[in-house]
Image (cartoon, grey):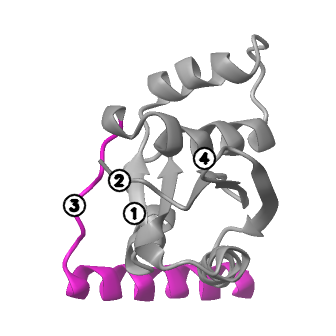
């Protein structure tokens, strides 16, 4: 079982990604929102590295989506990545608040706490080949360029 110095929850959004950084005892150490896109993902991973000053394998990250650019970006940075099923997130959310309304900051905190408290219940996706990762990064860059042009 992995024991992390820090865990990070990432609540994925179509325009922004909310990150919550939690230390090993469970204290919320920081929160940050990053824009969707290649630069935002680079800024997110840099923020995590700077805020923790820990080796990537000592940082567990959790995201609700088992695929996509956020997941791949975390894996490229060599963080330990956990995919959380939406139904699992819903159950973990009940630990924090009985309110059912979606809240990005709370969801990021719930996601960040899960690898710390329940790593055995989470799925760790297998890394994709480096060629696929490069191709997807180029696709994200092309998507960003098209978006900025329009």
Q: Are marks 2 and 1 in contact (CB under 8 Å)?
A: yes
Any part of residue 64 in sight: no
Disc on res. 126: 3
- Picture residue at 80% right of the left edge, 58% below the top: 31
Locate residue 137, reporting x and y percent: 43, 84
In the picture, which quadrant includes the C terminus?
Answer: bottom right
Q: Secondary structure at mark 2?
A: loop
Q: Are marks 1 and 4 in contact (CB under 8 Å)?
A: no
Q: Are marks 3 and 1 in contact (CB under 8 Å)?
A: no
Disc on res. 29: none
- Which residue position is annotated with label 2? 2
Mark toward the start of the polypeptide (2 vs 1): 2
Disc on res. 80: 1
| Crowd class of label 2 (few under 14; some 14 to 19; many from 20; radius 10 Å) | few
Q: Secondary structure at mark 4?
A: helix
Locate residue 123, reporting x and y percent: 30, 43
């Amino acid at each position: 079982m992995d024991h992390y110095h820090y865990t990070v929850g990432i609540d994925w959004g179509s325009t922004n990604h909310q990150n919550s950084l939690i230390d090993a005892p469970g204290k919320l150490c920081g929160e940050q929102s990053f824009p969707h896109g290649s630069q935002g993902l680079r800024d997110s991973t840099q923020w995590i590295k700077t805020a923790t000053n820990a080796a990537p394998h000592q940082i567990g990250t959790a995201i609700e989506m088992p695929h996509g650019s956020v997941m791949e970006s975390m894996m490229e940075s060599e963080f330990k990545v956990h995919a959380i099923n939406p139904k699992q997130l819903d159950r973990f959310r009940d630990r924090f608040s009985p309110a059912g309304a979606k809240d990005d900051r709370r969801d990021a905190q719930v996601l960040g706490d899960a690898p710390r408290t329940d790593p055995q219940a989470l799925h760790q996706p297998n890394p994709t080949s480096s060629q696929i990762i490069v191709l997807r990064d180029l696709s994200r860059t092309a998507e960003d360029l098209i978006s900025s042009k329009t």
